[in-house]
Structure formats: structure tokens, C-alpha cells
Image (spheres, grey):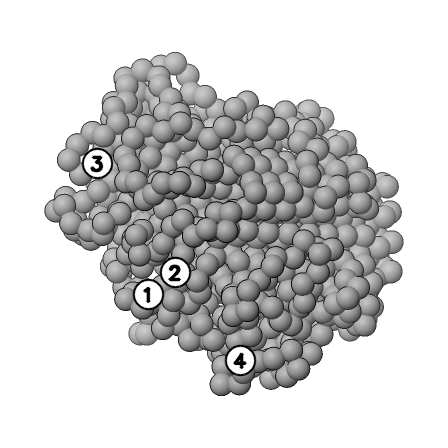
Amino acid sequence: MPSRPHHSTCFARKIWTDVEMPNINKFGQTARSLNQEPPDSHRVEDTTTLTFANEPFSGFSVKSSTDHRKGRQRFPLTCSDYYLYQVGGKGVAPFAPANYKTFRNVKDYGAKGDGKTDDTAAINRAISDNGRCGPGCTGSTKEPATIFFPSGTYIVSAPIIDYYYTILHGNPIPGCMATLKATPSFSARWLLDSNPYGANGLAWGATNVFWRQVNNLVIDLTAIPATREVAGIHWPSSQATSISNVVFKMAQGTNSKHEGIFMEEGSGGYLGDLVFHGGGNGMTVGNQQFTMRNLTFWNAQTAIKQLWSWGWTYQGVSINNCKVGFDFTAVDGTALAVGSVVIVDSQINNTPVGITFGNTAGTGPATPNNLIVENLALNNVPTAIRGTTGTVLAGSTGRTTVAAWGRGNEYTKNTGPVKFQKVLTPNNRPASLLRNGKYYALSKPTYEKVLKSGFVTARSAGAKGDGKADDTAAINNLLASAAAAKKVVHFDAGIYRVTNTIKIPPGSRITGESWPIIMSSGANFNNMNSPRPVVQIGSPGQAGSIEWSNMIVSTQGAQAGAILIQYNLNSGSANPSGMWDVHVRIGGFAGSNIQLAQCAKTPGTVATKDNIKPGCISGFLSMHITKQSSGLLMENCWLWVADHDMEMPANNQQITVYTGRGLLIESTAGNIWLYGTGVEHHQQYEYHLVGTKNIVMGQIQTETAYYQPNPDALIPFPFTSAYNDVTIDKGQSGWGLRIFKSSDVLVYGAGLYSFFKNNDNNCAQVGQGHSCQTRIFSVKDSSRVSVYNLNTVGTTKMIMYNGNDIASANKNENGFINTIALFRV
């Protein structure tokens, strides 16, 4: 966020300065299924298979332990069968100039994709056309764009410059993914630059780089000399961003200085379904927090080099034929900067050193490199984990599995801090959360198997998306008819204003182009004593599942009774629903009527229930997973109450918006998977788990409302037992995470942050006593709760258990943050 404190001690600010067919698996994806068990031989071969499928939707039976829904070969698809060719480009941007294009085919701008022509200028024209928000613009949601790359090889001789609110999107049909291939003379530091450096640093402050995606591409650096320092993607980024289904091709060998991804700053975030071939470092990364899932590395010198972090979760990583798997050592040999990391359900093969941490000079903070490893399969990895002084956990030249190992500070309800470095007892995982012993996961659908006839679009069904018309009836009719016909609903770009509840029936499959917005408006959503859902997924207790991706749910003006998303479906653990890149965004954008002009911060005024502006009270509850519901996976979903105005010329100035509650999970059956989710700036709490069970979370991230405790968490929304509200003391700020009367809650990384006190961030600075708020995390009347790598900022007490403070920040210092590696009750 714009005023988030800078932390110079957290990372080193040095800037490290014929294509193979993409890997394709039998489910018709390209970068998503290389986590299969390798053959018994020590040499792991990079083999692929290729089949096609295009069958009608028939439920959500998951046949794989990780990512994919099974399909059968019916007939081969051609590249032009991809649905975006057929239905894309019909959207609108209500606040953009006339004739603005929300969908741009790079070939329409002169790109050839023939493997010969230099397409650099044409691609950059496609991205920048119509005066979009590029370097020099602090932010804008007025000009969303999807930049589409048809199949082909696009020669690139200079950096491709990404813009704000942009999706770079290729064709996911097997054999059709576009390749961005660098020329031998390419001399820049990165091929795709999402945040260029200028005279004053990054074009966009990395903690404000939202709304970016890169999907379905091959990045090929192999023509560049191996000794030239170059990265495929430069990605200093934050929430609501993702890179998915991308293959990186780099020079191999000990002299390679190629990298797939370079990320040095930000507050993310999510990456997933990526394959890296070669490189000095497969990727080099640093950020406040991140979730990375389903990454596969082949023949790199080091698969992952971590520059710094507060909290990081790696899930489903496969490392093959590298020299080092994970490198968490100090960048400059002295100051440690990797705060905490979780590695879960991963494998390392034919790699001498699996994990290395520590520093060569033996200095650093008191609790450096907190690390938790759970379910790590090793094959021919002689050193499983190496520390500063040598091996701390031996591996094997054969096969072995690290059930659990960790280091850091440990707490129980009665003890702590206890410093440890040892083999651990792994979490007791509920069977309903697993597939073949690993946590269930499912990649965002790309619908490459569905032809045009299997889609229906929002604007063709009568919705306008212009931010003015009432689209309620058109959308509800569309969703009902599409579910009955088993068709996918494609929301064209636009702002869909609704005045009553949008109902998503079971069996729905919904995806958006350029982050279309469902925006509530009017009196129906403005009674905090009678809240109602803006988007309702199923009726209470109804059975079935849905898929929903790439959309935003928002409010317009005063909406004190709006529950933005209500999930009611009883999907069960066998056929769970999925939400990917579905975000709640309240205020701070054009058309919301909750911007700097209406809701500027007022730290100099004592806020009371009588003088708070009614027009700045918007949102009763961001998302509710109700008691009767079960079976929901959420990946890279951000529930955000805006702390600043994103539009020019506001220049990210802070605003104050009041939304009562964040994510409330009351599902009695549970079976909820939260991967890479964040909830920020709500009044009473960010995450609240009540009477639920069988929940896996990681990496989660929260921020306390910047205005608190002026007012505190008691106003403007009063306590209501109907929604299991929290009893809050006068002067208290909202909870980051509260677990109440729940069981089997497993947290694989949590960043709970309080950066401000009455919009002043001095309280979060080192040496200020962690004084932004007193408490941020509570567990009460609950059992079998396990938290790996709890990281806090600005809070005096880190854990309250059954009403007692059991962990203080000053006993768990870890650079800028405070960290507890293991907490179990």
C-alpha cells in the first residue's frame, strides 16, 4: 500500500543485472502436471504426452491428486477453436475514451508471430494503445485490457513493457501456446518487464502493483548467450496478480546467468503452474509474502534463489536434475533476509543439495531463516538440508521422505518460546482435505476444451456492463439458463450494476475477461440491520458445485447491508467448488463513488458513530461461507477494502472506507482450501472461523484498517449475534485471524499486519514497540489448530489463547517482522 513502511533491512536492493515444444500433459494443459513421480533411475527425463479432449461439462469429479479433471480424447482441436478467438473483444470500459479496446490481438497491431519478424514494437503498441496507464501513471482501473497472443513465435529484441490493469494471455490449447523468443542481441535485464526502473526507481511502487496476469505463454531465452544476465519476467508485484501456465526456456550449464522470473519487491501474491528449463537460477524472488504452487524445474543450477521474505509458501514444487533446490542463504553473505518459508507436498530429484539456509559470516538476526518442511519426497538428494556449518538433515542416494522438519521458535498453549531445529511430527491431516496423501489443489480452468457453442456471453444475453443500466435481471436469466444448458458464462469486460441479488446456481461455470465487475447499487443493499448478498452461490444447503474465475465484486456508494459474496452450496469434499482470481474490491476505483473526493482520511477528527460519513459505509460482510455449505477451494482471492484511491490524479492518497467484516467461515462440515488469499481493512476482523473444521490455509495475509483505532472496531457496525460477531473491547482494533469453536484448522503461513494507527505508520517502525495495536490473532475453544510461520507486524501480542496472551512480539524478533515458526494447540 502507498504508505507502507520501507524496510531497508529486508532485502538486498541490488538489481541482478530452435524452441522446444511446451510440456503438455494428458489433460490438455501445458505447464500443469509435471509433478508426477519420476522413474526409478536417477536420470529424470523430461517426457510429455499429448491428447485432446472436448467433452461437455459433467460435474466435478477429480481423478488426480493435484490439479486436473479427467477428460477423454474426442477429436483434435485447432488453435482457432480457442473460445477467446470466437467470443472475446465484445466488452466495454465505461470510463475509458470512446472506441477504447478492452481486448487486443497483437496481430491486429502488426505482430507476425512467424519466428522471423521482430514483433517487439507491435506487441508494445498493443499494450499501450489508447493512452493506457503505463510508467508515469500511478494507477487507473479505467482502461482494462487483455492482450491476446495467437499461436506463433514472436521475436523480441527489447523489453515488452507491461501496463497497469493488464492481462497478457496466450492460447492454452496444446501446441498453440505463443512463444516470446529473445534475439541473440537482446541486452536488457528482462524480456517482459512488468515494472520498469526509471530515474526514481520502479515505475509503480511494488506494494501497489495490483491487477496483472500473465497466462499461457512460452518465454524463450535460449538464443541469448548463457553468460548474459537476463530474466524472462520482471515481477515486483502485489495482490490480485498472477503468472500461470507459463514455460521458461533458458541456457543450461554452470555458466548460465539466465533466470525465469526475477522479483525483488512487493506484497503478493500468487504464481502457479509454471515450468522452468535450465537457468542459473530458475527463479530469483523476494517479496513480503507469496504463495507458489505447482512449479517444476529441470536442469537449473539453483531452482529457487530466495532474496528475502516475510512469509512464503511453496506447495507442489518439483525440482529435477539441479545442483541446489531451494537457496535461502544470505544474498551478501552476512545479513539474513529470508524471514520464513513453508515447503509442503513437494519433491526434489537428482539434486545434491535439497535446501540450504544460513550465512557464511555467521551474523544476522536472532531468529533467522524460519523454515518448516512437510511431506518432501527426495530421490538421490545426498544432503536434504544444509545450514551455515554443514548438513543439518541428511538425505540419501535413494528415495526418502521428510515427513516434517523445522527451525525457529515454537509455542504451545503452555510453553514458549522454545527455539528448535529438528525433525517434527507432521500435521494430522483430515482425509477429506487430501488426494493421494497430498492436499487437494485444482488449477484455474482455461476452458480450452470447450468450443464456441459451449459459451454464452453476458452482453449478448442483454446485460450492458456500462456501469449505469440495471443488469440484475439479464444476469440472473443468463446464469439460470446457462447452468441448465451446461454452458460456460463469459462475462465481457465491463461494470455490471445490479440492484438486487445475483444468484449463481449449482453447475455454473463462469469466467471473466479483463476483470469484469459486478457492482451493487441502491437501497436494497444499504440496510445494515437487514443485510443481503450481492452474489449468492446456491441457496442454503443446496447441493452441487461451481467454477468461477477472473472477476470482481464491488459496491457503489453507501451499501451498509451488502454481503458481497455468500457461499451456500453443500459441495462436499469429493466434488468441491472452485474460485480463482475472484476478488472483492470496495471503494477506490472509478464508478464506486467511494474515492478521495467522498472519503478522504480524517485522522485529525475524532470519529464517532454520529459523524462518520454514511456514503463511506459500504459493505456489511465481504464474504460468508455459511453453516450449511461445504467444499470450496479459493485460490488467489483478495477481499480488499480500499485504503487508497487508485485513480489518477489521486496518486494513491489514503481514503477511509468502512466495511464491517471480512471473510466469515461458519461451515459446520468445512473442507475449505484457501491458497494465496488475502483479506484487508475491515472493521471487526479479516478472517473469522466459527464452528467449522477441516480448513487448510496458506499463505494468508491481512492488514488492519489504517484508520483504527479512530474509530475502533466497535463502530460503525454494531455487534450482531446473527453473524457471530466478536465481542470487542473499547479502543481495540480488528482481529487479523480469529478461530473460535473450530477444529482441524491447519495454517501453512500467515502474515497478520498492522501498519498504521490513525493513519500514522510510525507505530510499525523498528524500535517503536510494535504499538499499532495490542492483539491480532486469537484461538478460543478450539482443538487441533496448527500454525506454521506466524508473522506479525505492529502488534504487541502475537497470540491470544482462550483469553490469555501467550506470545509477545518482543520475544520473536525477526528483522522488521516478528515470527513464530510453530504454534499448535
Identify which residue is drawn at 35% across, 50% down. Answer: 819
- In the rendered image, the residue lying farthest to the left is 361
Identify which residue is drawn at 57% across, 62% down. Answer: 728
Closer to the chain start, of discs 1 and 3, is: 3
Number of marks: 4
Pick the residue in front: 189 or 319. 319
Q: Residue 31 carries which label?
A: none
Question: Which amino acid type corresponds to the residue marked 4 in the rendered image?
Answer: Lys
| Structural distance between the alpha carbons of marks 4 and 3 | 47 Å
From the image, tell me which residue sits under label 4. Answer: 601
Closer to the chain start, of discs 2 and 1, is: 1
Closer to the chain start, of discs 1 and 4, is: 4
| Structural distance between the alpha carbons of marks 2 and 4 | 25 Å
From the image, tell me which residue sits under label 3. Answer: 387
Secondary structure, mark 3, is strand
From the image, tell me which residue sits under label 2. Answer: 796
Secondary structure, mark 4, is loop
Closer to the chain start, of discs 2 and 4, is: 4
> Residue 314's image quarter?
top left
| Structural distance between the alpha carbons of marks 2 and 3 | 31 Å
| Structural distance between the alpha carbons of marks 2 and 1 | 7 Å
Pick the residue in front: 219 or 473. 473
Q: Which mark is residue 769?
A: 1
> Residue 386's image quarter?
top left
| Disc 4 to disc 3: CB gap under 8 Å | no
Nearer to us of marks 2 and 3 is 2
Nearer to us of marks 1 and 4 is 1
| Structural distance between the alpha carbons of marks 1 and 3 | 31 Å
